Image (cartoon, rainbow, N blue to C red):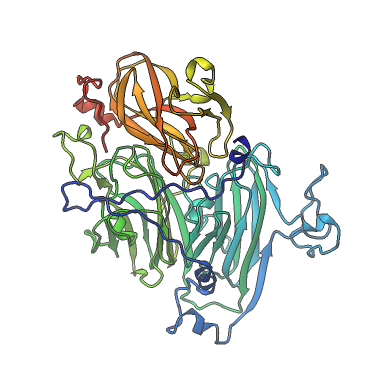
Amino acid sequence: MTDRFSSRLQNASVPSPPASSRHERTSPVFPSQGSRRLGSVLLVLAALVTASPRVPAGGPLEGLAKPQEGRSMRATSTMRVGEMRRGGVERKLDPAAEPRGDLDEASNWDNFRVAPGQTHVLMDEQGPGVITHLWLTFLGPEPQTWAPQGSANHQEMLLRIYWDGNPRPAVEAPVGDFFANCFGRRSEVISTPVIVEDADSYNCFWHMPFRKSARIEIENQSDQPIGLLYYNIDWIKKDHLPDDAPYFYAQYRQEYPVQQGQDYVVLETTGRGHYVGTVLAVRTRSPAWFGEGDEKIYIDGEAKPSIWGTGTEDYFLSAWGLKRTSTPYFGVPYFDQWGILGGHTSAYRWHIHDPLVFNTGIKVTFEHFGWISPDENPDYKSTSWNEREDDYASVAFWYQTGAPTFAARAPHARERKLPGLERLTIRAAEFAEERYHGIGSAMPQQLPLYPDKQLLYKPPQPDGAWLEIPFEVQKKEPLRLLLNMTQSYDFGTYQAFLNGVKIGGELDFYHAEIVDREYHLLDFWPEPGAYTLRLECTGKNVQSRGYYCGLESVRLRQRRPRVTEMGHDQDKDWRQEPRLYR
């Protein structure tokens, strides 16, 4: 049992959540679940596609049959003659030296370890030229042989690209978000300009012209080192560039949470150019569906947006909600669970065949409207059109001539990390003693899924199988009770009780793979005092091999301040009518 949990879980996934409602509906509708993944053929085709603002009329493949100008070049992390990168000696780096190609094992040390607080330069070259491809890889954040204490995650690495010696970076975004991998989580992306194969090979095919110079760097803003950073940056050295060739820009921005009464701004700049892409990450702070807000795009200084959409999922070219998917021009790399408080969604949309053209300026915004639960509504009812206060982060991608006027800058990684929502977290691994469980054994267990250990309970049968986790509430306030659980192929079904009161329906912990999932149980205003969460085994899924249970934590999650201000449920007795808002 222990050995199978210790294996590396790079591609664990949760079931696709139901999709959302539309504006005109009076209640959410849940169509069928599912997800799509494009195969290796698409990966090869995508590599041939360029995101140049000037794509030949016959397509990118036709362009390959025409003469190409310039000379191919590469900036790379390959080991070079005379360098010392490891072995407890003084580091010596010489990016101008010849690549090392001897038979010594050190010749294969084609990577860098970037210490906390350090900035590593990947490319510093003179132009004119055009960058055509970036490839990066590095260790994931989990502890492993090469990094027993773990490594920085890609949200903590800040990518900056400078053109022509300008002190202001043209590209400034966390590495993960730039490659449509948000929240510090690794997810596969198979699209035209961005491909993250197997969630750990970061490729970018945006074309990036420069006249005088190009400098690409990554700053490690983590407390952990960047482990084993490899990279290849392909570019073409040119004799000249067209006078009207625009520069490539990408800028990160965030609001935790979004500002009430103001649309979320992805980009606002003056100049001439075309907008080519959006990456958006949303962490919900209310239950239900967040994505009814429209995109509103202002062209050339207009007072009212001439481009006005029909919903967030529509802008990302999906329908009836969002679910995990990856296509050449749009996708949702991460969507954990439908409608929960604290859910995560990230999406990308590339405007390659439909760039948003502007002559004097552009402003790209999103409304933040959607469904909310009745206890957050002044009239204590659920409708599809409520202003929500969720956490938003984004990266805007565009080309333009002239200097952008977008004032946003990426904050430090400490500020990019989402603030915690938990009022109380009870780690289940602390309750492995016999008095806290029924028949069978219980033990703490470390999984790659969690930074801390989980409690693994192994009953041989459902009769007499139970777990109990005690906790203390200090203050009466609106909270959500939830369980952070493991699902697996030999896990059982359980019923939850709080202080002897049955909460919700039967919980099925079976999954064909080993994954984590939150189970939300109750919205309530608990009185201060002692509480006990109890899970009783009721059997197992017909596909499951056993009755086991893996509990990482019991959590009490904060509700939005307006729940307290409205106080709809403050005097209701949760024991008489347990309620979970969805």
Between 136 and 552, the one lying in front of the other is 552
Residue 109 location in percent, x, y?
76, 54
Between 59 and 17, the one lying in front of the other is 17
Total marks drawn? 0
Residue 78 location in percent, x, y?
73, 60
Residue visible at 33% across and 18% down? 500
Residue at the outermost left position: 379
Identify the image quadrant of residue 492.
top left
- Residue 512 visible in the snapshot: yes
Q: Quadrant of the C terminus?
A: top left
In the image, is 133 to the left or to the right of 227? left
Q: Is residue 576 above or below residue 109?
A: above
Q: Is residue 463 above or below residue 295?
A: above
Residue 257 location in percent, x, y?
35, 39
- Residue 421 visible in the snapshot: no
In the image, is 114 to the left or to the right of 38? right
Residue at the outermost right position: 103
Q: Quadrant of the N terminus?
A: top right
